[in-house]
Image: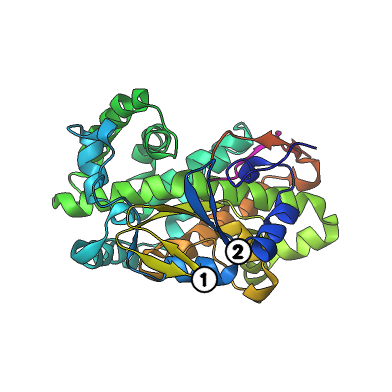
């Protein structure tokens, strides 16, 4: 058995026993090999996420050096997800206003042709298209958005190479042009683009992991879940907790901060193991997948809705969920997106 690390665990076949041991035996420790603190218990994760002195970017490196001077760097500097301090609240409010006006009933119009498309199209393309349609883009114009969202996700992912910046910058320019008429204000335009980035890998993982766990259930149970909207949403929410699409995130100390019995020094980083906190018995069923505090995910409920629509649509096409197989995971340091085989159509 391969020894797991806090970063390799996200794409391991079954990392949850490892996470549980970390939460119990090493709730908050410094790991020299990663040059970072590891927050694994529910208490430690909650402390870090709710302390505004733990920022989403280092104070002296708000925009990664590889992105500076590019369209991607400009977008990164304005993204709610990457902003702290006095600018965070108004930018978050802007994005919340975008989501307040969406027509959730329009999500299904963004679905790809599930009879001819692979499951990857459902996992990756559909969330981007759905958000674009919800933000007022016509379904026919939303089809090409997925490739731009993918370029952004690859460039902003932990460990991304500098070579990803140029295609991501081109994607930013293309998306700004697409959203220009809908949102003349650039801040709102960039807020919309930020939503596409945040939904890309995370919602893909939620859809994929939900399909996998439904495939493991008895067909009669799966049928009952899928036909009941509340039951399906509840099932998706439990998958988000027990086999989450996002396993970790990072925070950076803006000053010295006490956590548990440790002292985190200024500029030190913390790898926040959301998946470990979810499985901590002390969490008592709480879900940390969508974060907490000021940076809690704005679109958590929307991700569950998009996933529910995707699953219901796949079943409606006649797909046999029991035939779905998981063949490992897409390479990543923080997200868990399964590689799924094609569904067998009846």
**Which colouring convention does the figure follow?**
rainbow
Depth order, front residue of 152/224: 152
**Residue 269 falls left or right of residue 289:** left
Rendering coords of residue 204 (x, y %): 54, 45
For the N terminus, the quadrant is top right
Instruction: State the predominant SS element of the stretch in magenta.
Output: loop
Q: Which residue is mark 1?
A: 260
Q: Earlier in the sequence, mark 1 or mark 2?
A: 2
Q: Is residue 316 visible?
A: no
Q: Which residue is pictured at 27% across the width and 28% down the height?
A: 170
Q: Please say if 274 is above or below 184.
A: below
Work out how far the residue at label 1 is from the one at label 2, CA to CA, in angstroms: 9 Å
Residue 335 covered by magenta stretch: yes
Q: Which residue is pictured at 37% across the width and 58% down the height?
A: 265
Residue 15 covered by magenta stretch: no
Mark 1 packing: few (<14 Cα in 10 Å), some, or many (20+)? few
Depth order, front residue of 130/45: 45
Q: Is residue 244 visible?
A: yes
For the C terminus, the quadrant is top right
Rendering coords of residue 331 (x, y %): 58, 33
- Identify the secondary structure beneath mark 2: loop
Badge 1 vs badge 2, beta-carbon distance below 8 Å: yes
Q: In the rendered structure, which segment of residues is drawn in magenta? A: 334-341
- Identify the secondary structure beneath mark 1: loop
Rendering coords of residue 309 (x, y %): 56, 56
Q: Which residue is pictured at 29% across the width and 61% down the height?
A: 95
Question: Mark on residue 27?
Answer: 2
Q: Please say if 335 is above or below 221.
A: above
Rendering coords of residue 65 (x, y %): 26, 34
Question: Mark on residue 46?
Answer: none
Q: Which residue is pictured at 29% across the width and 25% down the height?
A: 166
Q: Please say if 30 is above or below 259.
A: above
């Amino acid at each position: 058995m391969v020894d797991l690390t806090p970063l390799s665990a996200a794409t391991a076949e079954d990392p949850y026993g490892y996470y549980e041991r970390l939460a119990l035996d090493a709730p908050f420790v410094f790991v020299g090999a990663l040059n970072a603190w590891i927050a694994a218990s529910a208490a430690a994760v909650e402390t870090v996420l709710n302390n505004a002195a733990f920022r989403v970017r280092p104070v002296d490196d708000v925009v990664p050096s590889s992105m500076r001077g590019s369209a991607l760097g400009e977008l990164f500097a304005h993204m709610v997800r990457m902003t702290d301090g006095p600018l965070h609240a108004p930018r978050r409010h802007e994005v919340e206003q975008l989501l307040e006006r969406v027509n959730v009933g329009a999500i299904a119009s963004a679905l790809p042709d599930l009879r001819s498309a692979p499951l990857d199209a459902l996992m990756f393309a559909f969330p981007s298209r759905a958000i674009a349609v919800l933000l007022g883009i016509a379904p026919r114009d939303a089809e090409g958005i997925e490739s731009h969202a993918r370029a952004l996700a690859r460039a902003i992912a932990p460990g991304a190479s500098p070579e990803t910046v140029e295609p991501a910058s081109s994607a930013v320019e293309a998306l700004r042009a697409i959203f220009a008429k809908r949102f003349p204000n650039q801040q709102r335009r960039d807020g919309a683009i930020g939503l596409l980035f945040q939904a890309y890998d995370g919602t893909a993982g939620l859809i994929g992991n939900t399909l996998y766990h439904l495939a493991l259930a008895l067909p009669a149970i799966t049928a009952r879940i899928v036909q009941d909207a509340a039951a399906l949403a509840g099932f998706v929410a439990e998958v988000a907790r027990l086999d989450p699409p996002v396993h970790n995130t990072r925070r950076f100390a803006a000053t010295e901060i006490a956590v548990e019995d440790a002292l985190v020094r200024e500029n030190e980083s913390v790898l926040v193991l959301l998946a470990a906190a979810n499985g901590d018995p002390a969490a008592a069923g709480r879900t940390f997948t969508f974060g907490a505090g000021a940076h809690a995910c704005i679109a958590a409920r929307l991700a569950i809705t998009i996933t529910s629509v995707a699953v219901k649509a796949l079943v409606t096409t006649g797909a046999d969920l029991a035939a779905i197989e998981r063949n490992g995971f897409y390479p990543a340091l923080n997200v868990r997106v399964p590689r799924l085989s094609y569904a067998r159509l009846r």
